[in-house]
Amino acid sequence: MARRVAGRLPRRVLRRALEGQVGKAHRGGYRPRPVPAVVRMDLTTAQHQARDVLTDRRRLVPFLVAFAVYGFAGITVPLFLLFAGGWWLPKTIDRGPHLSTGPAVVIDVLLLALFGMQHSVMARPSVKAFITRRLPDALERTGYIVMTCLAVWLLCLGWQPLPHRIWSADGVVGTVLDVGFWLGFVLVYAATLLLDHFHLLGIRQAYRQYVTRVPDATADRLQVHGPYRLVRHPLMTGLLLSFWCASVFTAGHLLWALGLTGYILLGTFLEERDLVARFGAAYRAYAERVPAFFPSPLGASARIRLRENVFRRSAERP
């Protein structure tokens, strides 16, 4: 095998690839360092695992399905955000064929309701338990992701633009709004990476189950680093920015933003109940210190006093 590869690759490149990191320069070349035994063992184990997976369809097919769904999500998410922002696509939230106002509003509302129901229903523990009776546990997240992607495509392809303009901003204001959209776009990806991108999209569970045969040992820990130091839900912050920041804002865009913002608020409320149940006092302290969606100029103590004053005044009203 080494000789066949050597016929296609330069000998120096092959030697450095096989023997690991290079050492100090020696007579115009490099003195390679020997690969540690642990690394050689890991490489051998990986080769055996790859051969076992390729020869066992019961392991190969589920992993390829999870990998294909991961790729499907990788295409769907950016297209969804570009559709919402009205960027580059032939059909967007504001552009494309549409019906008259009345039927268009009815269709759009139904599509938003279906999108929200899919997310909410499939996220419930009872539904997850129902799914795992028919799918392996390692593919439960993959099933959720593929249904979510299909719901996104249905929402975008069936969306009826309502072209009446609410605002159209040029100059500095328009630039600021467009920058806000792209900031939200980037924040969505940054938040998923910090939350364990591969676990969130289901590929890690399938890889551990069908390739390495190691149980999924993802730590159930509270994420408080990066953008999570500023807001508790940076993924939702990114979505809100991408939904509301637009230099051209139409009636259809308003309906879209209102519908999905309502879903985000409801979903976040339910998620925070689960987080309190999982992390207890640690999450309560984190929630008191860090705002939900947007950074606050007030300190934690000032926000707590403000919240207490609001609750006190509402309780004093007859």
Image (spheres, helix red, strand yellow):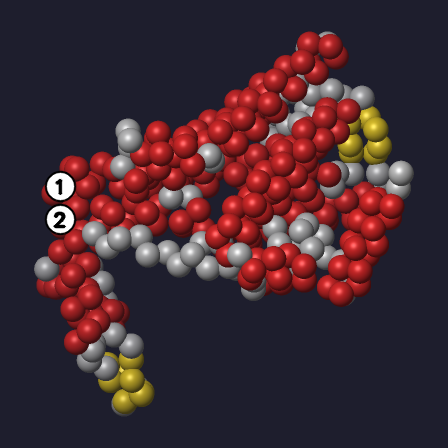
With 11 as the anchor, is 160 left or right in this view?
right
What residue is at 17 percent from the left and 76 percent from the top? Answer: 37
Percent across and percent down for residue 280 are 53, 56
Q: Quadrant of the N terminus?
A: bottom left
Q: Is residue 46 above or below residue 206?
A: below
Q: Is residue 238 above or below residue 221?
A: above
Q: Are marks 1 and 2 in contact (CB under 8 Å)?
A: yes
- Say what secondary structure mark 1 lies in: loop
**Image-quadrant location for residue 134:** top left
What residue is at 27 percent from the left and 89 percent from the top? Answer: 26
Percent across and percent down for residue 272 are 58, 47
The foreground one among 303 and 99 is 303
Please name the residue that numbered disc 1 is placed on: 56
The foreground one among 204 and 164 is 204
Percent across and percent down for residue 32 are 23, 81
Q: Quadrant of the C terminus?
A: top right
What residue is at 17 percent from the left and 46 percent from the top? Answer: 53
With 76 as the anchor, is 146 left or right in this view?
left
The foreground one among 32 and 206 is 206
Residue furthest right as drawn: 318
Dot 2: few (<14), some (14–19), or many (≥20) neighbours within 10 Å?
some
What residue is at 47 percent from the left and 35 percent from the top? Answer: 123
Q: Is residue 13 above or below residue 104?
A: below
Residue type, mark 1 in image? Asp
**Image-quadrant location for residue 206:** top left
Please name the residue that numbered disc 2 is placed on: 52
With 80 as the anchor, is 27 left or right in this view?
left
Residue type, mark 2 in image? Asp
Percent across and percent down for residue 223 are 52, 59
With 98 as the anchor, is 204 left or right in this view?
left
Dot 1: few (<14), some (14–19), or many (≥20) neighbours within 10 Å?
few
